[in-house]
């Protein structure tokens, strides 16, 4: 299991995209079982990723990547067990 929420945040795209190996997936989902903050983050990220994949990239605002990076940094910063 991951000890830090930041480790989960670093693997989330890999998990959602189906690119994670078995051990990474196991540790990721084991952490989710005990961390409500990460469950919430995972569900929000999954919805954002789905929403971002639906529109034509040409329809996204010019600063979409910058905004998403900011959001990810804020979530990682605020998601910790302290």
Image (spheres, rainbow, N blue to C red):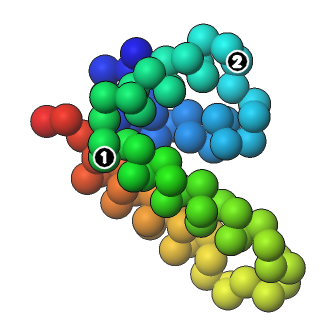
Number of residues whose C-alpha sits closer than 10 Å to that of mark 2, classed few (under 14), some (14–19) or many (20 or more)? few
Disc 2 element: loop
80 relative to 41 in the view: left or right: left
Disc 1 element: helix
Q: Residue at x 31, y 28 (%)?
A: 34
Residue 78 position in % (x across, y down): 25, 53
Residue 73's disc is none
- The foreground one among 2 and 63 is 2
Point out the tag, 2 or 1, that comes first from the N-terminus: 2
Which residue is farthest left? 82
Q: Residue at x 75, y 34 (%)?
A: 18
Q: CA distance from mark 2 to mark 1?
A: 23 Å
Which residue is farthest top? 23
- The foreground one among 37 and 56 is 37
4 relative to 46 in the view: left or right: left
Q: Residue at x 49, y 48 (%)?
A: 42
Cβ–Cβ under 8 Å for marks 2 and 1: no
Assign the N terminus to one quadrant of the image: top left
Among the 4 quarters of the image, the one containing residue 22: top right
Residue 37's disc is 1
- The residue pinned by badge 2 equals 21
55 relative to 40 in the view: left or right: right
| Above or below: residue 3 compared with residue 50 | above
Among the 4 quarters of the image, the one containing residue 3: top left
Number of residues whose C-alpha sits closer than 10 Å to that of mark 1, classed few (under 14), some (14–19) or many (20 or more)? some
Q: Residue at x 31, y 42 (%)?
A: 36
29 relative to 46 in the view: left or right: left
In front: mark 2 or mark 1?
1
Residue 17 position in % (x across, y down): 74, 42
Residue 49 position in % (x across, y down): 66, 61
């Amino acid at each position: 299991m991951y000890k830090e929420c930041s480790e989960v945040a670093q693997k989330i795209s890999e998990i959602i995209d189906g690119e994670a190996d078995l051990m990474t997936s196991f540790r990721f989902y084991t952490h989710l079982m005990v961390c409500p903050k990460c469950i919430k983050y995972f569900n929000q990220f999954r919805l954002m990723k789905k929403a971002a994949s639906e529109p034509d990239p040409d329809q996204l605002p010019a600063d979409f990547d910058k905004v998403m990076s900011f959001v990810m940094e804020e979530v990682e910063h605020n998601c910790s067990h302290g």
